[in-house]
Amino acid sequence: MAQVFSLLLALAAPPSVNSAPWDEAAARHLLSRACLGGTPEQARAMAAMPLNQAVDRLLAEASEAPAAQRPPWAREVWVNKLRRYSDMPREEYLVTFRRASSRCDREMVDLKTAWMSHMCGGPSPLLENKTLFWHGHFTTATSKLFAASQAQEQQLATWRGHALGNFRQFLAAVTLDPAMMIYLDMEGSERTNPNENYARELLELFSLGVGNYTESDIRGIARALTGYSLDAPRGVPKPDRPTSPSTARSMARDGLVPTFDPASHDDGAKAIFGKTGTFKLDDVLDLVVSHPACGDHIAARLSDHFGAHDPRGELRRRMADIFRKTSGEIKPMVRELFISREFLAPESRGNRVKSPVRLIVGACRDLGIMGGMPASFPSASAILGQDLFNPPTVKGWPQGDEWITATTLSLRQRLGSVIVDGGDLGDAKPLGRVRGTLVPREPAEARKLIDRLLAIDREKAALSDPPSKPIVDKASLGKIAGNDDAREITDRILSRMLVIPPRQATREAIARALETCPAADRPSLAVTLVIASPEYQLE
């Protein structure tokens, strides 16, 4: 399947040229990569400015964007209420556990939906895109953070606040972020048993990359970061009831405030990067950020994320030099990326598969939909492989052709109808409802089992949220389409939504499909088919 899509990519890609002019096409590319999409009107306004001014305006909007409104369920002071006390009957605890789990699930859906809505209609889509990048770089996952919607909400605010700031300051916030401390086991790491998980990922994934550290460095950093735990805020009274000895750590902590205990810290001499000292947290961060490989690693990750065509690594070297000269400032690195010939070159356009979030948010932004999103959209993104706040591994999400499988490709082709007509992408039923189920040989008994399974499906459907309503205004689509002519509608929708030129085969297939349907339905069908096209799946 990846080979098939690579062939489509090659067919859709523009011809290679040496120059990279700043024009409306380049502005469309910048909006697509930096701002998760945008309308032709926005691209024309941007192209009317000098490139430097256009990029500076995007960065200024990101720097000046107000903080996102916190959800009503988030708490300034969070105290754990999931503890099982020694005198609590098992039945009482199970009720508490189920209620807390259900509440957290609802809160996570709310958080995902609000974030995607903010990507679509917030004051700075660039800031949200950068936050999404860091969310995949500094990875945590709800799969290991039971009932931790509060921790994930706090982390999102932290990542957003540091997305274009100083990397050293960002790394300090990452290290003592409650969700990160839980996910990579820094919580409770102490002198007698230092946990190396965070130290390893700090070097391998977050800052330096493979080959730029030793196992001894990992052990030294793990020892230097001992002594931290999560506790209730200072002065907040704790329950005066003994906790059951069998209570898991995730339900026994009192709060989400990083707290340092000197008695649990290893204050002995450690060797890190060839230096020896009684290093602590701040010392570790200084050593990591000043390491020659740190700027190179961050420059490479940024360049790869935004898809710059940089075969000789010249852009990455310039960005790494900026990192070192500015002591780790992220914003000037991003500016250098966006104004670079490598990023704006036609070779950088249409050369990568859109992630599910980018595909969904981008379709809304390309159509000028800046309102709230239904909860079905984060669910659709998860079905397509990108579940916000739950990357598959500590390495984050895949990129490029890895987004395309036999399952996700067919679902991507249905996405346009979900956006235009409403409903849920999860409505697609798997082939063979009873596949994998042991069915009795006797026909009557088999029928009873199948009926029970179908009854369970109906019960689940009755308890689930109603299908989402369309968020696309059909009247607005009609204005975009201009008239009833199938070929003119095709050209208008293609020119509005595609960053790269369409193949003639795509144009002809859409036009022929439109000719077979009523004139009133043609704008909606055109959008649905464009979103399903190979060209739109690329950015």
Image: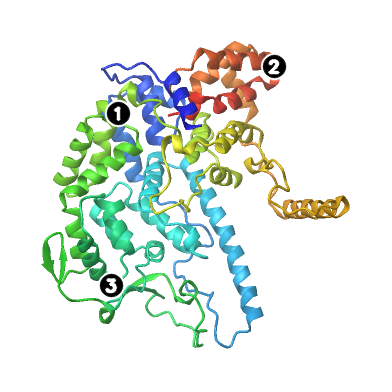
Element under disc 3: loop
Q: CA distance from mark 2 to mark 3?
A: 68 Å
Q: Give the residue at mark 3.
A: 226
Q: Residue at x 20, y 55 (%)?
A: 213
In the image, what residue type sits under mark 3? Answer: Thr
Residue furthest out toward the front: 441
Q: Left or right: where does residue 82 sit relative to residue 337?
A: right
First in sequence, mark 1 or 3: give its number: 3
Q: Residue at x 46, y 58 (%)?
A: 153
Around disc 1, counting alpha carbons within 10 Å, would you say few (fewer than 14), some (14 to 19), or many (20 or more)? many
Q: Give the residue at mark 2.
A: 519
Q: Left or right: where does residue 405 sit relative to residue 208?
A: right
Between 26 and 316, the one nearer to me in the picture = 316
Element under disc 2: helix
Q: Position of residue 141 (x, y in %)?
A: 45, 57
First in sequence, mark 2 or 1: give its number: 1
Cβ atoms under marks 2 and 1 closer than 8 Å: no
Q: Position of residue 302 (x, y in %)?
A: 30, 40
Q: Give the residue at mark 1.
A: 309
Above or below for 15 versus 227: above
Element under disc 1: loop
**Residue 66 shows in the view:** no
